[in-house]
């Protein structure tokens, strides 16, 4: 089978990583169409040795395609997802535009990939930090039940996109021998700084990034009332998100049991021998497709508590790799890829 | 009154910061003696416009002094504290050598400065992260009681000393256009990395730095059984520690009440208007003597939970400033500074 695949947002950090991951995983793509906004600087991108033109996104571009990977911002996804669906194209969207729509599955294939079995026409790819957190919590939830989860993230600047990454580089170079220069958008410098602000703030005092961890972990794990809280923090690293996770389970769990559960879970690699210098770090996770977990220990503050530390590449498993895995799973569904067709009139929000 | 003061470890990051803080706060120091190990590179350090010689530490150096600030490693503190005490010198020790000795007060002046009223001959200065955490928790504990605390730290490389800071600079410069170079001591690069490893690891899987937060917060707050846990993480910033604190109180507390409690506490500055870009960051705290707190919000995971984020300069309030404040408090004790004299025979551990 050879699939006709669109990548919308092909010139961004996540879009380019999707192309690399599609190559590496040898996904059977026949016709590849690269789309971007009109401001895209690149005219062609190489894929499997061929220079593929990057075209401005337009309705005609979707005709006859099977699948579209969206690596664009929310407004772009909101505008073009209905167009794609009307053209019978299944959309895997890495933006947050549809993640909280009950009709749209939010998928980490190793956790809830079964949701792909009924050929949903639109699948949402979760938040970059949440994917690793949900992956690591899922086997604990299944084995012992979750009572409460407290997360603190350490997120790389690439999670904010290419311009932010350029700001980090500019700040690092300008801050080698003095204070880092002011950021062009007026925010606090990324370089040599720790900033508890990712995405905009909500009325409850949480940042939207923090609420994404809350909302999306609940949805992915199928635990809509899970007690979970998060603090989302930007740190001056380029690629790779890490998180400290404190979890209270419904029963006590020895760290050895947790490590065994994780080791038996696809997509997770246990890196946990601190005294030998083995634990997850940003640099250890960068460039990899798996989620690293370690520092597992019995919580000294609670008899049923467990602490751990996770790391993953936010552009790969946190975005591109997870989206490509969703594509792979859709392609593997018996009966092949359903042509979703336009949603029935009046059922736009519940057409699954 | 003009005091004879010793700084042991005067050439290190904390020792030099102590000298700057003593100048800034106009502490009435008459005779100042600077001591260091034999490897100290500097021969003189300027203090109030005079070049003071740095001498190798020796027993004779303590004779006739009133007070000694120790800014040295544990073995050095363990060796010279008894010598200082035998010479009648009151010691304020920034190492962790004596912090867990029941007879030695562990002091954050704004929290438990009353312990200085009985002229202890040896006072321990707490861990750099813990000072800010305890300062922010103290008014909450007094007003509402603490049920459980979960901390995640974001600690600067200066907390590991001058050589580590040089490693960060080397890693940043070597990593501008490629992967950062390996660290000379074999550890993971500080540059562009997040590392959940500070100090050595304990048998329970926690790092010693994490257990310092646990042990020292309990001791400073006078809550020996407080349920508290921590994850201590090194991030690639130069100066300034931050921490995400999740606390369950004995009763629900509105963030406005928490902010009012903090605003009424000396040494704490509330920086908390996230939508206007006001929240604690590393760079905002660096160079300041106060503890910044913000991001206060009701915990979405617990009805009595409160989240906040703190930042402080780990060389100043986290070390030098707090130690100098202890000196100031000792000097202010009615009756003047007690000459502690040698501890009575057989009562070495309980001579207070």
Image (tube, coloured by chain):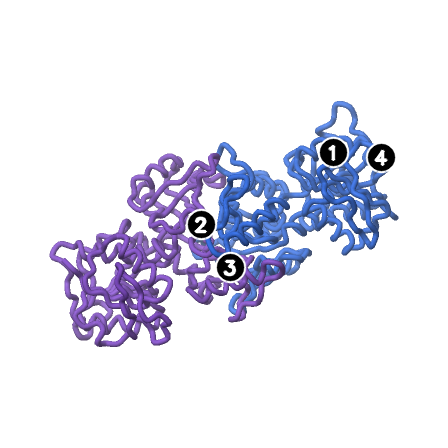
Chain colours: A purple, B blue
Residue A318, image x and y in percent?
36, 55
Quadrant containing the N terminus of chain A is bottom left
Q: Are marks 4 and 1 on the same chain?
A: yes
Q: Are marks 2 and 3 on the same chain?
A: yes
Instruction: Report the Cα–Cα distance between label 4 and label 2.
Output: 51 Å
Specify the subunit that label 4 lies on.
B
Specify the subunit that label 2 lies on.
A
- What residue sits right under mark 4 in the picture? B63
Are the residues flagged by discs 4 and 1 in contact, CB closer than 8 Å?
Answer: no
Viewer-closest of A144 and B97: B97
User: 10 Å neighbourhood of mark 3: few (<14), some, or many (≥20)?
Assistant: many
Q: Are marks 4 and 3 on the same chain?
A: no
- What residue sits right under mark 3 in the picture? A196
Query: Is residue B343 shown above or below A122?
Result: above
Q: Are marks 4 and 2 on the same chain?
A: no
- What residue sits right under mark 2 in the picture? A282
- Is any part of residue B285 visible from this angle? yes
Specify the subunit that label 1 lies on.
B
Badge 1 marks a residue whose secondary structure is helix
Instruction: Report the Cα–Cα distance between label 4 and label 3.
Output: 49 Å
Q: Residue at x 56, y 57 (%)?
A: A192
Task: Say which of marks 4 and 2 sits in front.
Answer: 2
Residue B97, image x and y in percent?
66, 35
Q: Earlier in the sequence, mark 4 or mark 1?
A: 4
- What residue sits right under mark 1 in the picture? B81
* Residue closest to the far top: B346
């Amino acid at each position: 089978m050879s699939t006709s695949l669109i990548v919308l947002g092909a010139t961004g950090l996540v879009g380019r990583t999707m192309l690399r991951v599609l190559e590496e995983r040898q996904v059977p793509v026949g016709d590849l169409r690269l789309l971007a906004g009109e401001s895209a600087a690149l005219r062609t991108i190489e894929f499997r040795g061929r220079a593929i033109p990057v075209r401005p996104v337009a309705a005609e571009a979707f005709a006859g395609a099977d699948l579209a990977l969206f690596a664009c911002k929310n407004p772009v996804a909101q505008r073009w997802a209905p167009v794609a669906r009307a053209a019978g194209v299944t959309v895997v969207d890495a933006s947050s535009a549809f993640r909280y729509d009950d009709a749209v599955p939010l998928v980490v294939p190793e956790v809830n990939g079964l949701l792909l079995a009924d050929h949903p026409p639109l699948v949402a790819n979760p938040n970059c930090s949440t994917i690793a957190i949900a992956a690591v919590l899922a086997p604990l939830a299944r084995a012992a039940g979750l009572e409460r989860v407290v997360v603190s993230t350490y997120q790389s600047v690439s999670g904010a996109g290419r311009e932010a990454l350029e700001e980090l580089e500019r700040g690092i170079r300008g801050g080698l021998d003095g204070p880092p220069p002011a950021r062009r958008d007026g925010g606090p410098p990324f370089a040599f700084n720790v900033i508890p602000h990712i995405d905009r703030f909500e009325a409850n005092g949480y940042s939207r990034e923090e609420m994404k961890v809350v909302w999306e972990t609940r949805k992915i794990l199928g635990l809509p009332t899970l007690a979970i809280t998060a603090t989302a923090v930007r740190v001056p690293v380029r690629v790779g998100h890490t998180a400290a996770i404190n979890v209270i389970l419904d029963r006590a769990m020895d760290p050895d049991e947790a490590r065994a559960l994780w080791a038996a879970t696809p997509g997770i690699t246990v890196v946990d021998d601190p005294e030998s210098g083995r634990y997850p770090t940003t640099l250890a996770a960068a460039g990899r497709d798996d989620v690293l977990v370690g520092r597992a220990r019995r919580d000294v503050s609670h008899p049923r508590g467990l602490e751990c530390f996770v790391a993953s590449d936010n552009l790969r498993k946190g975005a591109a790799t997870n989206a490509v895995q969703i594509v792979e799973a859709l392609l593997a569904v018996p009966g092949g890829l359903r042509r979703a067709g336009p949603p029935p009139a009046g059922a736009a929000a519940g057409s699954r």
